[in-house]
Amino acid sequence: MTFRSIATLLTLAALTGCSLAPPYDRPTTAATPATWKTVEGWRPANPNDGAPRNDWWTAFNDATLDDLVVRANAHNQTLAQAAATWRQATAATREARASLFPTVSANGSVNHNYSGSGSVVTSTGSNSATVSSGRSSTSYRVDVEASWQPDLFGSALNTTRNARYTAEARLADLANARLALQGELVTDYLSLRASDAQIASLTATVDAYQRALTIATNRYDAGIVARTDVFQAQSQLASAQSDLEGETRTRAQFEDAIAVLIGENPASYRLASIASAWSPVTPDVPVSVPSVLLERRPDIASAERQVAAANAQIGVNRAAFFPTVSLSGSGGLQSNALASLFDAGATLWSLGASVAETLFDFGARKARVEEARAAYDATVANYRQVTLTAFQAVQDNLVAQEVLERQEAYLRTASVAADKSEETLRNQYRAGIVVYTDVVTAQATALNARRALIQGQLDRQTATVALIQALGGGWSAADLTNGVERGRAEGLSPTKAPTSMR
């Protein structure tokens, strides 16, 4: 059999080379409940982070927030790092894929050689001369060399698959980093606006307490009340002023956090306070959301791609038990004269093949296979844990939506009643019907109720953000419609989908 025949057979074997990685099937997860504790109509979901997402933060109807998210997407350094990591992984994939093909190189050289044995003196009559007996030569050579290691047992193929799956996981990590960034930025911004509302409320309270102190002082000067009324009024005022300073500090911290998220220097960044009264917007959450939206969670997709990469690595390590075959060849031209370099007689070529096999490694290859299998089992466990955590996050935030909505209603009722009680007792105090202690108690109750209401409104907003993140990036009427249609096509129960979303 000629060398060409051998090379042809090896080429065919490489093109049809086997893969020693186990057949990959996405690992099963814990059974997905048909319904949630508080919501009916959900259905099982699988990773699908390629589904389209909408700009969910726009549902809060705040132009400043929209601008901040755009700036964060463009300038956040954590996001830039995740993007660079993904680009690095894609480059590694291209590098791994290149190993499936031959390596070709070209060389050219010019060599000038001289050799001699000394000099000879010749004489004729009275004349003499020295003549060198050495020789010189020049050679020219051009070579093209090629080498290739046929992937007979799928080592290079599985290395490439491992790199590609890893790159896909890094892409999902990038999407997850973007979603986390957006969620953190929106939460910080909403918290800052709630802090603005707290500052406005406390400022108004300080003004009211200042007037109350003036009234108590005037009544004391007139001999109508005891001096304790003045002390109590001063204490209430100082306490409110302290709370105002603390809230100012809290707002500054949120402002600094936002600056870092959008890539600005906190020392010079300023975000103007709201000029009008705070009107928090909490987007309506559908009563039932198809669990197909869980397929949009990038962390689930990343965990699943890591499982696939670990599965391919098993094939890489198993291939080490089999021999490797290397093919090499070269061809070129060589001549002592540049003009005759390309003549037919100047050609030269060579072909070669080699086989290498490890005979004894005292269990090293077997240990690497076992290590790869253990790593695969670890990624499977992580994938299942991430999925369970995702369902927990959705369930927790669905419950939070219902509970916090009711709490906000109660807090609003309590705040209105406390304000009325404070006003009534303040008027009664002016009329001399009640003592100032009653006024102080009513003022403290009203202030706490107002602050609790603002906090309750913020809690609803941040719980909505958390639910959006748990669902992988929000929803829209189209998402819900698609989820319903998909469920019907698969013979599953349709869900109740709202026709619009505020």
Image: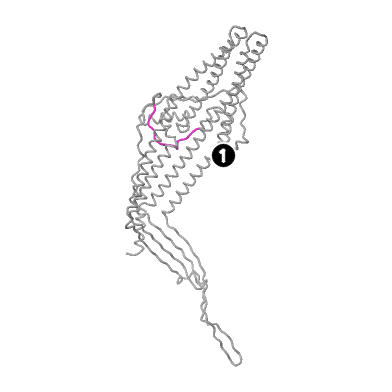
- Magenta stretch: dominant SS? loop
Q: Nearer the viewer, residue 156 or 368?
A: 368
Q: Is residue 49 left or right of residue 314?
A: right
Magenta highlight on residue 52:
yes
Looking at the image, which residue sits at the far front?
A: 227
* Label 1 environment density (alpha carbons within 10 Å; few <14, some 14–19, many ≥20): some
Residue 18 horizontal/vertical position (percent): 34, 51
The residue wearing badge 1 is 75
Instruction: Give the residue type at disc 1.
Output: His
Magenta residues (range): 41-54
Q: Residue at x 47, y 65 (%)?
A: 143
Q: Is residue 149 left or right of residue 249?
A: left
Q: Is residue 241 left or right of residue 18?
A: right
Above or below for 29 versus 222: below
Q: Is residue 372 left or right of residue 253?
A: left
Quarter of the image for residue 275 reads top right
Residue 318 horizontal/vertical position (percent): 34, 50
Magenta highlight on residue 67:
no
Above or below for 360 versus 443: below
Q: Does any portion of residue 502 appear in the rendered image?
A: no
Above or below for 351 versus 271: below
Residue 370 horizontal/vertical position (percent): 34, 47
Q: Tell me the SS state at disc 1.
A: helix
